[in-house]
Image (tube, coloured by chain):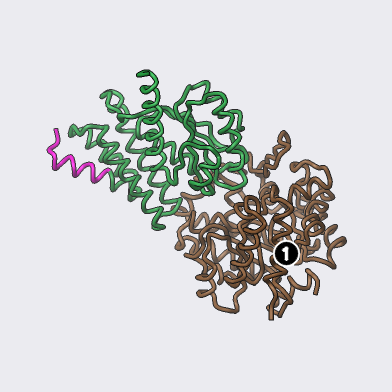
Amino acid sequence: MASEERTREILEALKDSVKDFEEEEAVKWAKIALEEGVDPFQATMEGLAEGMIIAGDLYNQKEYFVPELLMCSDALYAGLEVLKPAIEASDRQSEVKGSIVVGVVEGDVHDIGKNLVKIMFEVAGWTVHDLGKDVPLEKFVEEQIRTDCDVVGLSALMTTSMLGMPEVIRKLREKNPKVRILIGGAPINPEVAEKYGADGYAKTAGTAVDEAIRLLKMLRDEEQGKQAV
Amino acid sequence: MNSRERALKVFKREPVDRIPVFSGYGNITLHGLEQHGWNFCEIHTDAEKMARVAATSYELFGFECAVVPFDMGVEAEVLGSKVNYYPHRTDVVYPTIEQPAAETVDDLRVEMPADLAHAGRVPVVREALGKLKERLGEDVVIGAWVLGPYTQTGQLVDLSNLSRAAYKKQGLMNEILEKVSTFLIEVIRLYREAGADYITIREMGAGPDILSPAIFRKLVKPHLERIFSEIDSPKVLHMCGDTNMIIELLGDCGADAVSVENKNDVAASRAKLGPDALIFGDIDAYNVLVNGTPEQVAEAVKAAIDKSVNALWPSCDIWPTAPPENMRALMEAARQYGKRG
């Protein structure tokens, strides 16, 4: 077992490897974490994922841009590959985890944002069903029913493709009133999200997970409320 | 002074009676499309339909230009990407790249077709330009546009791969951008020859929402400079997103005018570019022109004029569901608030 101080050092190195997009460092420190007995779930959440959150902040501050974010996510994935088997074996996962269908709406082929969101959900231990890009509207509805997922995340980069969102949202609700819908992408803002009838809006990949957890908690509270009645 | 003279005078920095209202890219409306009864997906591949619809914003509202093409796939298709026109959709969905020419920048081969004038839809756009020139050439300026070299390359390969390469493989990227630029210069030459009065280059994929100013300066700007130096005036550089970080770089690419969207703080841009620079903008093409009321459209016009834009340009393609009353309000407000002298 690593001492508390050593654990902190390892977590810090994992975080920096993602933030500085050093894939090899991420792999190296993930292996060290396992060798020295650091909880692999903690190494993921407080190490790798924390680095990605910092990268997201740097993006918002216009210090990082899309290439940097992608390279950070490469490092995160590389580290995660090492830690994943140990996480699965340890049975530890995030407290509130659910399942999500993600995709970019039809008419839009830009999927970088969606892919970053997907990574963050995977890191948080969610089951992610990725429909890809340019997804026909009815496909979201079909996939939601097929997987019975808790949350559907819709992404659009362009104003032009964002306009398909209200219809998907309406159809999803028609089929399954309890599904929670999260939208994001460059043209989306909280006002648009509200106007379109989405439950949540995420500005960045990092906040998408927080927002989804909030929605999921809300959903579960509602269900418990019903059972209590 | 008619619409054509007004726009051309602005490019030459000569006095005009009022601010012109035109655009460097798509400005058609569903209202215009309905005049002809065609589906949106039909108008990208047929020169007559393309020209007829491109003329409608002038014919119906007095919008002061006619611009083709409407979609971002024309050049990419010539270079080997497969375009999806969404023929199954009867509503407005713009064509997209279904299958890029190559998966990665390492696999991409940019080759100039032997007969570019007859490759892909280049002849369709050229024929449409000719028809517009013939029918409206006395009344309004006829415009054509292409994507800038970096954004264009994004239509040829996987975007994630391109983004990483912009950081990690700048030597290779530079070679690719060089070839794509040479290709674009030829496309522009053909559009000009066919009747385009002015050319807009849209490089929105290389802005600070995506690439760092450092990479833009080092990797993209030299190619934009080369393209602008090899094409005749009038020529415009358009970039959407928050472009204040690089506005001086944009102003230094060799275009006659820089077109920005409403996320750009035009007053700040003006302060940096100086009183003589031509800045076009910044009427929000969706939130105002589609979702706004005619009063809000008029306010946006007034605000843009107060911020000293030299021509009222929509921030992007006018989204076709813009209601006729908003298009009329746009023109009316320009007449009301845009008097000069």
Expressed as whole percent of the image width and height from the top left, the position of residue B170 reads 48, 56
The answer to whether B265 is drawn above or below residue B176 in the figure is: below
Amino acid carrying label 1: it is Glu
Expressed as whole percent of the image width and height from the top left, the position of residue A168 reads 58, 33
Q: Nearer the viewer, residue B45 or A158?
A: A158
The answer to whether A131 is drawn above or below residue B38 in the figure is: above
Identify the subunit bearing mark 1. B
Residue at image x 69%, y 54%?
B112
Left or right, A106 with respect to B48, comes to left
Q: Nearer the viewer, residue B108 or B206?
A: B206
* Colour in which chain A is drawn: green
Expressed as whole percent of the image width and height from the top left, the position of residue A65 reads 44, 54
The answer to whether B165 is drawn above or below residue B225 in the figure is: above
Q: Could you tell me what secondary structure mostly forms the magenta stretch?
A: helix
Residue at image x 38%, y 35%?
A214
Left or right, A113 with respect to A1, comes to right
Question: Where is the C terminus of chain B found, in terms of image quarters?
Answer: bottom right
Q: Nearer the viewer, residue B7 or A70?
A: B7
Residue B289 is drawn in which quadrant?
Answer: bottom right
Residue at image x 27%, y 26%?
A92
